[in-house]
Image: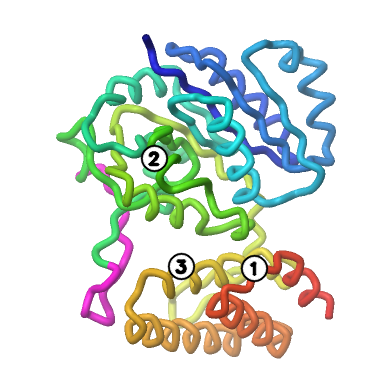
Amino acid sequence: MAETIAAVVVTYNRKHLLVECLDALISGTRLLDKIIIIDNGSTDKTFNLLQEKGYLEKSCIDYILLPENTGGAGGFYEGVKYGYEAGYDWLWLMDDDAEPKLNALEKLCEHLSEPNVSALSNLKIDPKEKIASTHLGFVNSLYDSDFEAEIFREVKYSDIQDYQTIELSFTSFVGLLVKRNAIEQIGFPKKEFFIHFDDIEYSFRLMLAGRILLVTDSIILHKEATAKSAITKNFFGKTFYRPAYEKLWLSYYGTRNGVWLRKSNYSTAKFYLRLLKNYSRSIIAILLFDDRKLKRLRFLTEAYRDGINGNFDNLKPKTLLYR
């Protein structure tokens, strides 16, 4: 009997991209048993558009509207929980701005029986057909004794050109096929993260349950539709990207979650050495480039403090922004 597969698509106020994603899923060469849409409280009439185009009448689609925006982490928590409780053997996770190639799932399915596997990953590419390097990669060593060593290393075409699969250390929720048995062992994504690093945290747990394999000929396009609001600053011939103040609340989550993740995986000495280095660099960047320096410094410090203490008050960033 064939193993059952459900897609979990998390969406928020990107209804036209969601439709493109759904069209790709419905047209795939390997049909899904279910498409689970988790709508994170969209306010752009996503429901109306789906209803108008007839998606909600399809038996293969389950639409779940959450009462509020719980962030990507909360959306994937709900989606994985829903799919797991429904009994599917595999869950294919993606954002609404992902568009799988028509044979992407078919190519993944060729490797469902690989030994000791917890998850299979698509190769994520951007609209220019470059590997989306922030969405998959390797961890050199969480406990590397070299203080200056880079922890994450990106995947390059030279890494994959001779292989059908390679083992990854982390991959994003833009095309990640997770095995039911792995979910039984490690649970659901960490909803407290809200956004940023939730997929890396889940990848680290997935590695406890088995290997994460990148299937190199299974392609998914990531459109990265989020508006680019960064401010560019030039210093000694280098370009630096700085968040606009009104978007600072979004970067808080990445800072806080990253600090928590490092504290959870590093030795104590390694963690505090890196924390001091990164915190100092961030202070210097604020003093060199940014407006509202005191408010930004407070934001940064609160994010670091909350990461160290494991405080996941997700209402706090917007409160800080306007205090």
Question: In the figure, is residue 156 to the left or right of 134?
Answer: left
Going from the N terminus, do you reach mark 1 or mark 3 first? 3
**Range covered by the magenta-colored residues:** 142-158
Q: Which residue is mark 2?
A: 182
Who is closer to the viewer here, 139 or 6? 6
Q: Position of residue 218 (x, y in %)?
A: 35, 28
Q: Is residue 154 magenta?
A: yes
Q: Position of residue 244 (x, y in %)?
A: 69, 69
Disc 2 is placed on an element classified as helix
For the residue marked with disc 1, what is the amino acid?
Phe
- The residue positioned 73% from the left and 42% from the top of the image is 40
| Residue 287 position (above or below residue 200) | below
Q: Which residue is mark 3?
A: 261
Q: Which residue is mark 1?
A: 312
| Residue 289 position (above or below residue 64) | below
Going from the N terminus, do you reach mark 3 or mark 2 first? 2
Question: In the figure, is residue 41 to the left or right of 156?
Answer: right
- The residue positioned 75% from the left and 11% from the top of the image is 57
Q: CA distance from mark 3 to mark 2?
A: 20 Å
For the residue marked with disc 3, what is the amino acid?
Leu
As drawn, the label of residue 257 is: none
